[in-house]
């Protein structure tokens, strides 16, 4: 096969995952950039194909070695774990939470075994996972546990803008306690190593400022003076190509223009707003710090429109394309 092989678990069947999967696999972008193996339920996908009108024929396989790479073929490992008599779109169902976990686990198994080059995930629902008794709240936690990765690292990418996060799911008050020199130094080193594994060479990483105008030397806050600036200077002294702190009201624009190859966002919304404003549909999450490569759409299950052929496949197409883009650089021998 000339293209990287990407595993695509269909996520929560009650959401838009099955629809965006079949729409994406029917697109020319995916066809020419990746070969895909879908992990899901055949009956759910048959329903998604009927709803969307995607020109696909399901080809059941038990192993990636059995793939048919002809156009219009959806290669499927059928987990057969959805009871269509009780299945409903747009509702939290323990059955769907359990199935979503099983799809992800199978994808990870294939990637760790070297049978696929990367995994591109679709949305799951935290309530459905909880209802199923799955002891993880989301993709990152599942991937971390099943791959043995202690600290999976999230990077967003859209239109060439790459954004890492020092902190994510913390309140603003709790986030401030994490703005420490040692945390920034450690995180930047992890980010730069992740970029290396993705084949990103050359260029400088920028560390965003926290306060307005980077604090104006203490007028609007001391974090830049006491923690962020010293962290950047230590990294520079150790030979790392890092700049900052750079005011958050301009650093993302400068990165889009090519001045920086990536940005370290200090908290959740700082980076999310920048990437999603630039291009909401094409903001893709890339999980680093694991022995396997994973990309993901950055939207939810959208229960309100599930099963209605409304959901756009653009984000799923981009997630698969990015997985295929980075897979050749993410050499398995470097991580296993």
Image (tube, rainbow, N blue to C red):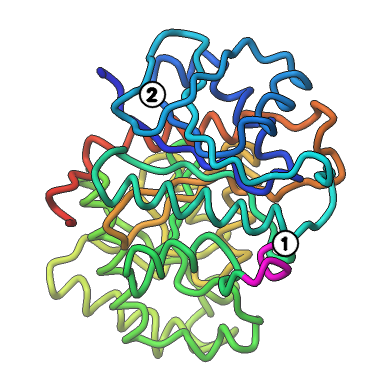
Instruction: For the N terminus, give its image quadrant.
Output: top left
Q: Is residue 191 above or below residue 9?
A: below
Compared with residue 258, is residue 265 higher up or lower down, i.e. above or below?
below
| Foreground pick, 129 / 206 | 129
Relative horizontal placement of residue 81, taking residue 292 as reference (left or right): right
The percent coordinates of residue 289 (x first, y second) are 31, 62
The span shown in magenta is: 128-133
Q: Viewer-proximal residue, 97 or 287? A: 97
- The Cα atoms of the two marked residues, 2 and 1, are separated by 30 Å
Q: Secondary structure at mark 1?
A: helix
Image height check: is 250 above or below 296?
below
Q: Is residue 335 left or right of residue 165?
A: left
Label 1 belongs to which residue? 128
Q: Which residue is mark 2?
A: 35
Coordinates of residue 229 in the picture (x, y in percent): 35, 79
Q: Quadrant of the C terminus?
A: bottom left
Q: Position of residue 306 (x, y in %)?
A: 80, 38
Residue at the (28%, 57%) spot, across then down: 194
> Of callouts 2 and 1, which one flags the residue occurring earlier in the amino acid sequence?
2
Mark 2 Cα within 10 Å, few/some/many (few <14, many 20+)?
A: many
Give the camera-side residue of 230 and 66.
66
Image quadrant of residue 62? top left
Residue at (56% x, 83% y) in the render: 175
Look at the magenta stretch and give its main secondary structure. Answer: helix
User: Which residue is rendered at x = 69% and y = 33% of the image?
Assistant: 44
Q: Please give left or right for residue 111 compared with residue 37 in the image.
A: left
Residue 29 magenta: no
Q: Look at the image and say whether residue 130 sits in the magenta stretch.
A: yes
Q: Is residue 11 above or below residue 287?
A: above
């Amino acid at each position: 096969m000339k293209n990287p092989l990407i595993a695509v678990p269909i996520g929560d069947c009650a959401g838009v995952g099955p629809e965006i999967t079949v729409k994406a696999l029917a697109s020319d972008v995916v066809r020419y950039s990746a070969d895909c193996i879908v992990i899901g339920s055949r009956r759910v996908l048959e329903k998604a194909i009927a709803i969307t009108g995607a020109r696909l024929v399901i080809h059941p396989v038990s192993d990636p070695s059995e793939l048919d790479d002809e156009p219009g073929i959806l290669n499927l490992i059928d987990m057969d774990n959805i009871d269509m008599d009780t299945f409903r779109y747009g509702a939290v169902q323990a059955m769907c939470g359990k199935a979503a976990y099983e799809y992800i686990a199978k994808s990870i198994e294939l990637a760790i075994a070297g049978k696929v080059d990367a995994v591109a995930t679709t949305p799951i629902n935290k309530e459905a996972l909880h209802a199923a008794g799955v002891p993880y709240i989301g993709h990152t936690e599942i991937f971390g546990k099943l791959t043995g990765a202690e600290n999976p690292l999230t990077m967003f990418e859209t239109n060439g803008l790459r954004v890492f996060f020092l902190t994510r799911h913390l309140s603003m008050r709790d986030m401030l306690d994490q703005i420490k020199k040692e945390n920034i130094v450690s995180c930047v080193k992890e980010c730069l190593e992740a970029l290396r594994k993705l084949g990103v060479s050359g260029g400088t990483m920028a560390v965003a400022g926290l306060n307005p105008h980077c604090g104006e030397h203490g007028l609007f806050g001391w974090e830049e003076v006491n923690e962020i600036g010293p962290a950047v200077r230590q990294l520079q002294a150790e030979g790392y190509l890092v700049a900052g702190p750079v005011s958050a009201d301009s650093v993302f624009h400068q990165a889009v223009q090519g001045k920086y190859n990536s940005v370290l966002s200090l908290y959740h919304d700082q980076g999310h707003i920048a990437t999603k404003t630039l291009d909401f549909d094409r903001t893709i999450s890339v999980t680093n710090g694991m022995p396997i490569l994973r990309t993901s759409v950055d939207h939810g299950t959208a229960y309100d429109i599930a099963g209605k052929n409304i959901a756009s496949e653009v984000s799923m197409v981009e997630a698969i394309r990015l997985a295929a883009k980075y897979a050749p650089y993410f050499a398995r021998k470097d991580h296993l």
